[in-house]
Amino acid sequence: MTTLLELRDVHAAYDPIAVLHGVDLSVAGGQVVALLGPNGAGKSTTLRVAAGAHPITDGELLLGGRVVTGARTRELARAGVCLIPEGRGVFPNLTVRENLRMMTFTGRSRQDIESIAFARFPILAQRASQLAGTMSGGEQQMLALARGLATDPAVLLLDELSMGLAPLIVGRLYEQVAEIARDGVAVLVVEQFAAAVLDIADHAAVMVRGRVEHAGRPDDGLRNELASLYLGSAS
């Protein structure tokens, strides 16, 4: 597999507080990497750095093997990096169809965008004329994913996909994430609750206080170690 996203010894700060302390992380095409850890560990900052939304104070960001440190969010988006932030990222006062139509700026036609979205998430076709803000949290997250897929991403960055959702819905969403990865997309998922994502992850990294303290395959050993790696639980 070809590495599409890589962070090398990355440091970042919210002046004057250092948040990331030498993060090394890579994601290959077709791979789901779970970035786990407690609140305040630096997970979301790592995603923002990867999307060009937060500056690196030291280290390198690479995309497809090319150093892109310092590139702006818009430049990385054009290069295939898509960030779906915590909190859904949809326009609640627009319908599902209007939310999707806004993605035509990518150069794809409305018909193509809707075809991709409705094939991946059939419930969105049923909700096409419904205001996004009146849908369930899971349906809104599906819409956020559909909007992201409209950019035809090479790298998909997901922040707390499970937030506020029932476990059954989360499981279905992550099944879709696994399918997206099988299409060759490199997927980096930030999750506080390990059980939500480990079943579909190919690799996992645990962040504690701005450092990756453990990385490897998401096997039973990792699940058993999670509680001691950060003061939380594996559920």
Image: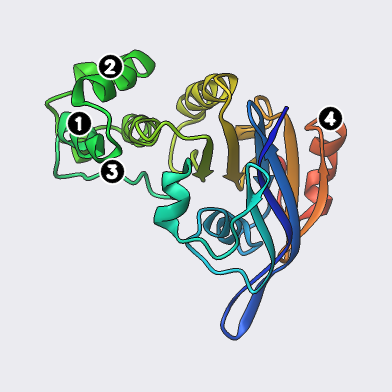
* Secondary element type, mark 1: helix
Q: Nearer the viewer, mark 1 or mark 2?
A: 2
Q: Amino acid at mark 2?
A: Ser
- CA gap between label 2 and label 4 equals 39 Å
Quarter of the image where one finds residue 34: top right
Which quarter of the picture shows residue 27?
Answer: top right
Circles 1 and 2 in contact, beta carbons < 8 Å? no
Separation (CA) of disc 4 from disc 3:
36 Å
**Residue position marked by numbered label 4 in the rendering:** 220
Q: Which residue is mark 3?
A: 90
Residue placed most toward the observer, 204 or 72: 72
Q: Which label sits on residue 115?
A: 2
Q: Nearer the viewer, mark 2 or mark 4?
A: 2
Residue 211 in sight in this render:
yes
* Amino acid type, callout 4: Asp
Query: Residue at position x 65%, y 25% from top?
Result: 200
* Residue 86, percent from left and from top: 44, 50
Residue type at mark 1: give it: Val
- Residue 36, given in percent of the width and then of the height, sits at 68, 47
Q: Residues within 10 Å of mark 2 (few under 14, many from 20)?
A: some
Label 4 CA crowd tier, 10 Å (few <14, some 14–19, many 20+): few
Residue for badge 1: 96
* Closer to the eye: label 2 or 3: 2
N-terminal label among 4 and 3: 3
Q: CA distance from mark 1 to mark 3?
A: 9 Å
- Placement of 165 over or under 205, stated as above or below: above
Residue name at image x 67 percent, y 25 percent: 199
